[in-house]
Amino acid sequence: MKQISKKSLITFKKSPSFLRLMGDIETIASKTLLALKQNKIKLYELEEYIMEKFYNNEYKHVAIVTMIAEDCRRNFLEEELGIKLPKIRAANINIAVKKENLILKGIENKIGCITIPLGIAGPLKINAKHTTNSNYIPLATNEAALIAGLQKGIKICNIAGGVSVILKYNGITRSILVETESMQNTMKLSEQLNSQSTIVQLQQHIEEHAEYTKLLKLTTHQIANKLWIRFSFDTSEAMGMNSATKYSVLLFEKIKSIFSEFSPQLVSLSGNLCVDKKVSYANILLGRGYELHAQVIIDEKILIETYNCTIELLHKLNYWKNYIGSSLAGAISNNAHAANIIAAIFAATGQDLAQLGEASICFTTTEVKDKKLYFSITLPSLPLGTIGGGCNKATAEECLNILQCNKKDNNNTKRLAEIIAATVLCSELNLLATLTNETELADSHIRLARGE
């Protein structure tokens, strides 16, 4: 599958066939819009309608077809609602791809694109297995002061020798929900599934059908005659939810075949124990995606010079704010604002934004030893990828290039995970140190947001 390149589109626009087609575009768009208004076609059918009716299903015209379809949707919406959408129109980029006789639009009913300001922070020195140099970090955010504060945190961490990061991959999960006719059969099925011989058999079954995906492990959880089977997959450089879903179907069919005496039936392809796109203790304890731990050791002198803050004061604030305050609020993790940084990097690099819930589970810890501050963060559930989804589209690909997550070493996603962890640490450190100075947080936000 290949995205339509800018170069190919420019070449096509210079060709005689394109110039001829351009003369027809207005007519095609007008006829399509009329059919849409007359309810002869639906919004989601535009690409297929235009391709078949006006371009004889010649898929070399996929770029122009998607452009016309998106224009028609915008025009329809503008007339329907009595509004104008010039900025959505101006921000538009073509993300359509073609695969055999299909138009893959990326998303359905596309009318354009939105814009989020993109800033840069760094360079940040990181000491990790896959990231051992200084890194610039692109962040997509509308929040003033976020990048300025992060930059200050990066400065102090660089002076301290950089952020150290370790990483563990727990795999991406899909939990299917099955049932048998009795709770006794469900328990027997659970016992069989947890046997090493069964797990090996299922792993071999995946190896026979998948090019990149591997089954790492499975766990089972029973309630009455229902059984949740939580599969963990290695999906290589991709975040991998589509692969996990696809191969969970394959595994269930195999389980149904092997253990036919229990007559297992599929209740749901997702039983919510995955746990995808939701905050949960399960992902803290079982892990999902990448588990990361990052640490920096800071001399008190550096803290005082940069923030007018002592080690004891910052340690006290972390305890009462992040631990006691979060516990009082019923939070299931303890941090200052980890979601801020993760959301900004996710948006910049084309990640699934809905996974911010689980990704932003973060534990920020402080210890004082030998007059030094040991500052660390832990991210137990960070699902992300550097191929597939939105990662290889338009600006996301360029942001991954900035992050140096574009190498041919199969470590790009690990590198991205390490960078995110180190960046979260810098931002956590900065915010906590800033908060020790009474109203400085509010003052800096007002100053930077208003340009005062």
Image (cartoon, helix red, strand yellow):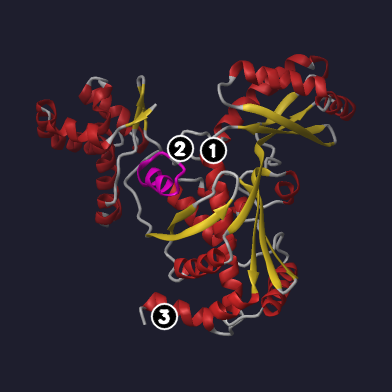
SS type, badge 2: loop
Tell me where residue 380 appears, x and y as whole percent.
Answer: 68, 50
Is 272 on the left-hand or right-hand side of 12?
right
Label 1: which residue? 411
Q: Is residue 395 magenta?
A: yes
Q: What's the amino acid at mark 1? A: Asn
Could you say which disc has been placed on residue 447 in the image? Answer: 3
Outermost residue on the bottom side: it is 438
26 with respect to 407 (left or right): left
Three-letter amino acid code at the position of disc 2: Lys
Q: Which residue is mark 2?
A: 407
Q: Does the magenta portion include 320?
A: no
Nearer mark to the viewer, of 3 and 2: 2
Q: Are marks 1 and 2 in contact (CB under 8 Å)?
A: yes
Of the two numbered discs 3 and 1 on the same chain, state the one appearing first in sequence: 1
Which of the pair 118/95 is nearer the observer?
A: 118
The percent coordinates of residue 274 (x first, y second) are 68, 40
Residue drawn at point x = 73 percent, y = 31 percent: 217
- State how far apart marks 3 and 2 are (Cα): 40 Å
Crowd around label 3: few <14 · some 14–19 · many ≥20 (10 Å)? few
Q: Give the spatial CA distance, label 3 vs label 1.
A: 40 Å
- Percent from the top left, x then y, of residue 436? 62, 80
Given residues 359 and 366, the one toward you in this image is 366
Which is in the foreground here, disc 3 or disc 1?
1
Prevailing secondary structure of the magenta residues: helix
Q: Say which quadrant the C terminus sits in.
A: bottom left
Region in magenta: 392-405
